[in-house]
Image (cartoon, helix red, strand yellow):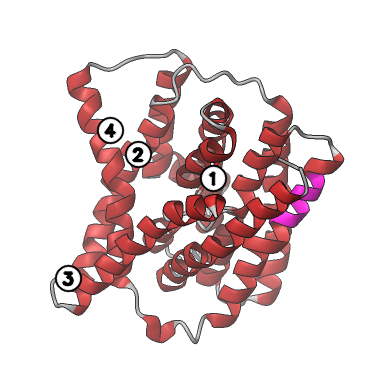
Amino acid sequence: MEHLLVAVNAVVPFLIYMAFGYGAKRAGLMEEALARRINSVVFQAFYPVMMFYNLYQNKGVRFSAGRLILTGVLGELILILLLLLIVPALVRDDARRGVLIQAVYRSNFVLFAMPLTENVFGKAGLVTASMMVAIIVPFYNVTAVIILEHFRGGRPDFAQLLKKVLVNPMILGTLIGIPFLLFDIRLPECVEKPISQFSALTTPLALFILGATLRFSSLEKNLRPIMAALSAKLIVIPAVMLAVSVVIGMEPLERFVLLSMFATPTAAASFPMAQNMGGDGELAGELVVCSTTVSVITIFFWILILKSTGLI
């Protein structure tokens, strides 16, 4: 029951933010056109601040878990390559291809890893989780930009693609944050405080806007790709990575952080990124909502399996 409560406490706030936005739209307080304009502001202005602060606040983190980092990054790269082969063979629309690939490999690792790891391993586990957040967030953002640009329609050359990657708001926030992390640069408190508050506001606001733009009338149309993506995202891929962690002899903490990379729901940031980069925003939003809801059950069972088998 304790582990179920952890998963519920991590997921339910997301559902409340989205329900609040949907309720505001239903009450006539938020027109969809306005919500989409605000969503663009969130993507262009708020997400860079959050990406910067995610790195900035990880001061003092030691990058020592080489096996965990290598396994996690290689696992993601192999998964992306497989998805680039499988998804285009099954889906014709480029706008949906990029969204589905992003939904399967990109997790809400930032917001789920910390509370889950702390509950199971205490504060000692937060150092390892923080380290992986600092590594995997830039990786997610760079690869997501490349994939969405690839499926945008045109075929830009490498120089054009690199330029678009570097000027992406999330990448800019990450690039600015890296020197602060590496050289432990500190900001004055009067500057750091509003940055931390803007960062904390980003996800609730993005999910509120997501709720305000949801149209469940299309859920039936998208049900098959959503079910396929969620099955792979929350069940099949975590099972494969769990098996890998056992074969290579990972420690319990390493194994749990690795699983939290692959078994948590689709990143909330995938919705505004898809909507602002030519992807199917409607499908992206539904994937975030559905994966977040279903993950309440799947995360609980993953923790239960790990605990009952002595793997953590």
What residue did someone put label 1 on?
A: 140
For residue 268, which quarter of the picture? bottom left
- Secondary element at tag 2: helix
Residue extending farthest right: 247
Residue occupying the point 27% across, 17% down = 187
> Residue 182's spot in the image, x, y percent?
48, 17
Left or right, 49 with reference to 189: right
What residue did someone put label 3 on?
A: 30
What residue did someone put label 4 on?
A: 196
Alpha-carbon span between mark 4 and mark 3: 27 Å
> Residue 309's spot in the image, x, y percent?
78, 49
Alpha-carbon span between mark 2 and mark 4: 8 Å
Query: Badge 2: few (under 14), some or many (20 or more) residues near its Cα, within 10 Å?
Result: many
Is the residue under label 3 in contact with that under label 1 (CB below 8 Å)? Answer: no
What residue did someone put label 2 on?
A: 50
Q: Nearer the viewer, residue 182 or 96?
A: 182
Residue 104 is one of the magenta-drawn residues = no
Mark 2 or mark 1, earlier in chain: 2
What segment carries the magenta color?
238-244
